[in-house]
Amino acid sequence: MTAERPTGTPVTTAGDRPGDQTRIHNIGYRGYDGPRLGRAYARRSLYSQSLRGAFGLGRSTRSKVLPMLLFAVMCLVAAILVAVTVTTKAKDLPVEYTRYAIIMQGLISLYVASQAPQSVSRDLRFKTVPLYFSRPIETADYVRAKYAALASALFILTAAPLLVLYVGALLAKLDFADQTKGFAEGLVSVALLSLLFAGIGLVIAAVTPRRGFGIAAVIAVLVISYGAVSTLEAIADAQNNTAAIPWIGLFSPVTLIDGVQTAFLGATSSAPGAVGPDNGQGAVYVLVVLGLIAAAYGLLLRRYKKVGL
């Protein structure tokens, strides 16, 4: 056993070459005695950083291009609609507040496809998820923060153009009560859309650490399902089977939101012939939407419990 020597005293042996010396330095160890902010602070920090990342903030310039471009296009189209209303002195906006997100669903789907994998795929790819769960946060904290961040980013993306429409309508001196009611209905619609799309996007993205695969899979689910449902609705309308149209709409996230707002928010259905669900069918739509949101949250919890082991 080596004998202890005073700190900083050179230790030499007979076999050492001239100039070779080993020094022992007592650098000490100081425990952390500052405030421990706990799970709530860690959860808030993860949420805020994920929300910023959804718009490329705090990331490279290239990462900012697509989300900021999509946000700008969403607001620019709304501004153009306002300009048309003011120029033509129309009595109402060309597009209902509840219809705007349905019309722009392609851009919204592209945003989800690009940002959902960015939110979770890197953690899976570089195996940093267990580090989050070491302490102080748990699996549920991670899932809630990620889910809430992407849903909030989607709400900002979809609600901002509605605000542009609303402010423009008031500046055009359109009826205040009608515009306020329509704006509130639009906010409810896009809030529900944000929760549904965020859940679907995160579940798909969490399956693979490959961001490219995640982007392709999200686009396939959101865009192809809408195309398939729209085609089936058109076929049913051509065969005068209008009773089947509301039930076909249950099989696409976009048409689900369209059905809910048609049944309960006074929106005009985008289905062929404007055949939307009645209140009874609308209740089924609501249950399906809420079930999908709950299922997405549950699947994410199961996925990250396995990853965090």
Image: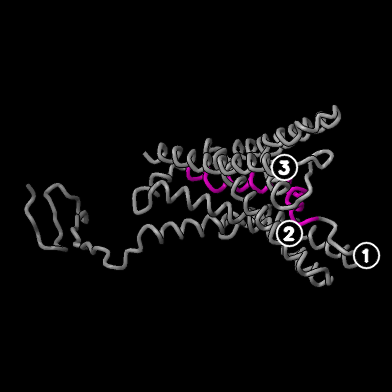
Residue wearing tag 1: 88
Query: Element type at marker 2?
Result: helix
Disc 3: CA contacts within 10 A as few (<14), some (14-19) or many (>=20) = some
Q: Quadrant of the C terminus?
A: top left
Indicate left or right for 308 with 196 as reference: left
Which image quarter: residue 229?
Answer: top right
Residue 31 image offset from top left, x and y in percent: 24, 63
Q: Amino acid at mark 1?
A: Thr
Q: Earlier in the sequence, mark 1 or mark 3?
A: 1
Q: Distance between the Cα atoms at labels 1 and 3?
A: 35 Å
Q: Distance between the Cα atoms at labels 3 and 2?
A: 35 Å
Q: Nearer the viewer, residue 71 or 158?
A: 158
Q: Is residue 2 visible?
A: yes
Indicate left or right for 92 with 207 as reference: right
The span shown in magenta is: 96-125
Magenta portion: prevailing SS class: helix
Q: Tell me the mark number nearer the camera, choosing from 1 and 3.
A: 3
Disc 2: CA contacts within 10 A as few (<14), some (14-19) or many (>=20) = some
Q: Distance between the Cα atoms at labels 1 and 2?
A: 24 Å
Q: Earlier in the sequence, mark 1 or mark 2?
A: 2
Query: Element type at marker 1?
Result: helix
Residue wearing tag 3: 278
Q: Amino acid at mark 2?
A: Ala
Picture residue at 72% right of the left edge, 42% below the top = 278
Dot label at residue 72 = 2
Which image quarter: residue 204?
Answer: top right
Residue 124 image offset from top left, x and y in percent: 48, 41
